[in-house]
Amino acid sequence: MALPKTSDEVEILSSPSVSIASDFGLVGRAIGRRFFSHIAFSGEDADRLRQLSEQGEVVHLMRTYGALSFHCLSWLLLSRGLPPIRALAGPPLHYTRTYRRLFQDRTLSHAMDRALSNGASALIFLRPHRTAMPLLVPREDPLQALLARARISKRPIYLIPELLQWRSSARNVVPTFRDLLFGDSEEPGVLLNVWSFFRNHKTAHLRVGQHFDLSAAVKEGGALSDEQLVHRIRGTLFRQIARETRAISGPPRKTTARLIEQTLRDKTLGHALDTLAAERAIDRGALQEEAKRDLEKVAARHSPLVISATRPWLTWIFTHLHAGVDLDQEGFERAQETARRAPVIYCPSHKSHLDYLLVAWLHMMRGITVPLVAAGANLSFFPLGTFFSHCGAFFLRRSFRGDPVYASAFRAYVKQLLREGYTQEFFIEGGRSRTGKLLSPKLGMLSFEVDAFLEGAQEDLFFVPVSIDYDDVVEAQSYMREMAGGVKEPESIRTLLAAPKVLTHRYGRVYVSFGEPISLRAFLKERLGIGAEEELPKELTGERRRSAIRALAQAITFGISRVSTLTSGNIIAAALHATPEAPTLLPLLEARCDYLRDIAAEQGIRLAPGKVGDALLLHLQEEGLAVRSDSVKGVMLTVPSEKRAAVAYQMNGLVNAAAPRSLVALALHAAGGEGARAEISARTRFLGRLLRFELALPVGIPFDAQLEAAIQALERDGLLERDGERLSLRDDPLARDRLGLLRALFRDLVDGHFIAYTVMAETLGPSSQGELTRAMRELGARLAEEGKVARHCYAKPTLDNAISAAMGDGILVRRADGSLRSGGGKSQVAELSQYLVR
């Protein structure tokens, strides 16, 4: 039975400002505004607490006692109008007004009963503070008291684990002298706690875990005694808080030497070294030493001190060098929620070297430990390599061919990282995209992670697609040179010293979006047709393994494309690219932009703020993408020849968004503007297969379903007419322009593949891939001189994709010595010539 409310208790449900004024004195409010107001407390978590407090009685739980934690939580609850804390299981704090606002009953159980009966909340610290001075413990176990209340209460009691995080570093497995003196990150001493808070309060977060229904646990407890039930509940709560902590701080920190030592003990690595020693008839110990040397070069040397020192510099880059970062907060929180359940591996798109730093900075600014990043060995040069390594980078070679010891050691290191539970990150495209669109996925790192999972390193892991998009890419000028035929410059100290030239420029905004996490366990079971109750095989081999990994790579790449952000630069460039050689009226350009935005919006693709009218014209002139001329018809815009590569680079960001429509438009164009659905389907299927390494298409959706959806979309757009099983292009000026716009999105890809297949059809003798690519570039340069193709259409990634497709179709065959022999290709050339957009 609830006690009658006193005048003080009536204030519990008053406005937040009055509650803060009553619970915090003048000094307390000044401190709160200065330090506590910075603490991030998501609106979603606040709404969840509010809903739980309306449904039942709320008891907040924290693992280790801290006066700062009590005052911070009190401030955050009051500032959001949530029920304030009126009962506390912990040492007294008589010197603070916040403590004096608690109900001061003779026993803890009476105080909690009174608080919960009057609509307030309670706070329990599960473990006393680590300190040299003994602390008073509650006169009774708070969980025992709550258990007794739950047996008679008509309302459910919710225990809510919470974590106030202002340090992202994990505890050391082997305690250091500093840990012994001041405490570790999970149980800090007073000095360490206060110092960490005042140093990091601007990036602190309150994280609210999944609530525990105590009343339901009592009903399910059955014949268990109170002591047994409390023991079970306490263990569950500790494990839940531990999961929250690990999602933020990562696994307990081990030295690099210890990680390498444990990696060398891996059974799969040991078996590989034994086999190699027997095959080569050499000492096994020598191979072990070689593997250790390789791991010394590979392993990350994660340093919280270096990361902390780096944060201000990265903040300057992304808020001053760039105009700011637009973060998909919902997607980021979804990824963090996933990390509470299993290790997470981020798979971002890769357009710039800044990508390495951006994901790490986003974690730093939210007090979350940074992921360990797989970086190319070309970045391991001094001093940049040392810096990246201390920030969490581990290095891998582009190719493992001819070095089985390195391959086995690296595979074992990845498995050890997964076994430890580290958050990881790797770029599924391999290298940076020089063309502006998603590159064909590389399967190396993905296969290592899948193999480690199947060997039992974790119960599950999640891949999170991440799209990083820029208004302006720092390396854009070098990419333009490479697309025009220039040679890629290797990373070196010289390029690092050229950074001041970069720092004098100002760039646009950065957009970061997170896709739906992909459970590897669920994906493999669905892909392999394994029931929910059945176990996955310990390993996959042959085509079954390759098919599963390819499908997973496609799902991740499609996930990236679905959450990409289309900038106004992407859309404007695509509109200009439709007719780059001819002047375009400004109203027509705006109409094209509107159509492309509609396509993106229909698919739920994120759109950055766009430019229209005078703003559009000003943007084009500032970027130098178009030259203005006035005529009797109005303002005309023409792309300068030297800017066509830049326009194509920006336009490529839109290729995947319009891919199905564009393929059908190309097929209809090749058929003369009309044809039977079966013919259009066959032509579209040919294009889709030929360009499959260029596109990010959904996994598991039949081709006919995608084709039908594209045809229906073109009908809705008013561009296509259907008469039974016959399709035809609509004879209308606006429809013709829009169909030309869709075909132009694939102009460079079709031209590039035409060049590649022409060379493959003419090459009879064996050639290396390098020789084949050089021959393709020579043909492309000759056609460009004749004005038949653009110079950027035969960029190396396009030619490499054409070679990969030809090898998959048996047109190119790799010989035992590594050379390639042509197996045909003339029919592809003849077919492709029909799709050339002129």
Image (cartoon, rainbow, N blue to C red):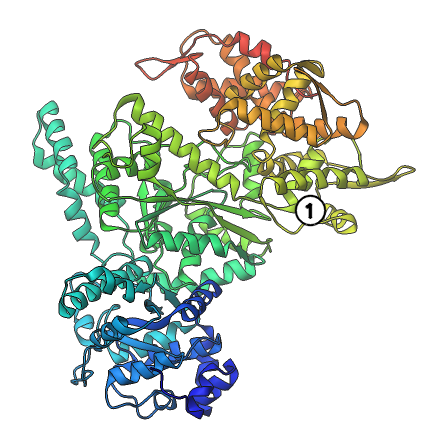
Residue at 72% x, 27% y is 719
| Residue 63 visible in the displayed image | no
The residue at which mark 1 appears reads as: 623
Q: Report x, y in % for residue 521.
A: 30, 39
Would residue 549 be found to the left or right of residue 65 on screen? right
Name the kind of residue labelled 1 in the image.
Glu
Q: Judge by depth and name the residue closer to the eye, 335 or 437.
A: 335
Image quarter hosting the N terminus? bottom left
Would residue 559 be found to the left or right of residue 1 on screen? right
Q: How many marks?
A: 1
Q: Is residue 478 above or below residue 720?
A: below
Q: Report x, y in % for residue 505.
A: 59, 55
Rendering quarter of residue 97: bottom left
Kindly give the residue lying farthest to the right in the view shown: 632
Image quarter hosting the C terminus? top right
Q: Judge by depth and name the residue closer to the eye, 78 or 403.
A: 78
Q: Secondary structure at mark 1?
A: helix
Label 1: few (<14), some (14–19) or many (≥20) C-alpha neighbours in 10 Å? few
Q: Is residue 837 above or below residue 473?
A: above
| Residue 435 visible in the displayed image | yes
Q: Judge by depth and name the residue closer to the eye, 506 or 694.
A: 694
Rendering quarter of residue 672: top right
Residue at 51% x, 58% y is 318
Q: Report x, y in % for residue 483.
A: 56, 32
Q: Report x, y in % for residue 522.
A: 33, 38
